[in-house]
Amino acid sequence: MTAIRNSGNITADDGIVTVNGWVQDIRNLGGISFLTLRDRHGTLQVTMPKKRIDPELFEALTKLHRESAISVTGEVKASDQTASGTEIVPVSFVLHSEAASPLPMGVVDKVHTEMDTRLNNRFMDLRKPEVKAVFELRSMMVALLNEVMQDLGFVCINTPKIVASGAEGGATLFNVDYFGRPAYLAQSPQLYKQMLMSTGLDRVYELGPAFRAEHSNTNRHVTEFVSFDGEMAWIDGMEDVTATIGTIVDRVLRGLKERGGEQLELLGRGIDIPALPYPELTYSECLEMLDAAGMHLEEGEDLGTEAERLIGEIMAERGHDLYFIVDYPEEAKPFYIMEKDGTPYSHSFDLDYRGQEISSGGQREHRYDRLVERMGKKDLDIGDFDAYLDAFRYGMPPHGGWGIGLDRLLVKMLDLPNIREAILFPRDLSRLSP
Ligand code: ATP
Ligand code: MG
């Protein structure tokens, strides 16, 4: 039987093999023609000396359109002309599906292709090895997250994505017509993961979609992203949460560096592993730093994109890629965050990665009366949160947690220019297809 091989495992003494792939390129040089076959692992050269192979086979192979899907059977020969050290001299082939011509975009051409064209033809864009590599790394990242979370005793959960009330503010809710009743797409699993803290599951995590009707077009916002959420009960303070995040992010960085060598090389990226613990800046320290750098923010104002970027620059000069910003004004944070009594601040944090927020979290308000008071302050209708509040009336432990944007984490780890590079089929203000 003919061995099935790919560009990653073929060797010169394999004899007759079959390889599957796409026709990347054909070069006809008169007496000899070369077909570059691309598969998941790389490329192989199919060498066709005109005199030595069947004329019909030669004719058919050299006429193939670029990007057609084929299987080639042939003899492996050693070659000092190719990167793999091998080449295949064909004896037969199967054309599974011929590619139409011209192609909607190039796969290996060096010309720059606009992001819109790439996303419109994502199936073709993903044939580029460096584009595909991002999603292989993303898959490794998800595996690593699951591993570390299970090691830390977290229970993997799934919460509803069609919900009756939002937790992160009304402006970014998507409406759903739920059999005539108003409903929304979930902005985060916040209310559910908190309710679970009253059950004894103690530590939960979820990797799931989150929906935000973001009206601005930026390189870090999409309307559907994957949120990596964690929530933990019986904490002594917010430090338990930030320390856990440090452990998790560190494990993922190390794991990607270890497992993703091939993909990182394709992307021309290295992964830096910052020392633990990641430093903390308070919100007030940030205002001072910004002031000194010539940017004045009023006390209580949220740190915007520009302020985050500037803090990122200052922290980079100090040698820090990843850092927490803690103790935000309670006013700037959602109702479920615990206030820092006697101050205008709160037990909250953001994790920033080179000048961009990748996570928000904190200690939650677990005391029923204080929670209801806080909801009043935020002008929320308590009646909309009945089921959530019930979980706080019968014994709720102190707890805290985080939401990390998975796509943003990957973007920063790989230093990609746009969140859309890390999402297979991104959704944004203007894009609903493919
Ligand atoms: P930002 O201020 O950057 O818009 P946010 O503070 O509104 O983010 P949170 O509600 O804190 O976002 O959500 C937790 C995390 O989810 C964020 O730190 C981010 O990583 C991710 N996230 C939030 N909104 C988006 C979005 N529209 N697209 C991609 N990721 C997002
Ligand atoms: Mg946030």
Image: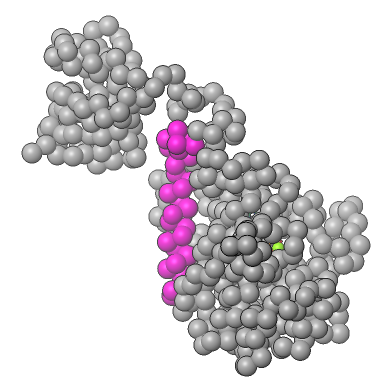
Residue 211: give x, y in percent of width and height.
Answer: 62, 57
Residue 373: give x, y in percent of width and height.
Answer: 81, 83
Residue 228: give x, y in percent of width and height.
Answer: 55, 64
The quadrant of the picture showing ligand 2 is: bottom right
Q: Quadrant of residue 119?
A: top right
On screen, 417 above or below 22? below
Locate the N terminus by quadrant: top left
Q: Residue at x 77, y 70 (%)?
A: 333
Q: Residue at x 77, y 83 (%)?
A: 372
Q: Is residue 141 magenta?
A: yes
Q: Residue at x 66, y 58 (%)?
A: 175
Q: Residue at x 56, y 81 (%)?
A: 196
The reply, left or right, for residue 143 in relation to residue 179 is left
Q: Is residue 113 magenta?
A: no
Res 56 visible: yes
Q: Quadrant of residue 314?
A: bottom right
Question: In the image shown, does 362 or 321 lie closer to the viewer?
Answer: 362
On screen, 67 above or below 157? above
Please report the bounds of the magenta region as a residue range: 122-151
Question: In the image shown, does 410 or 288 lie closer to the viewer?
Answer: 410
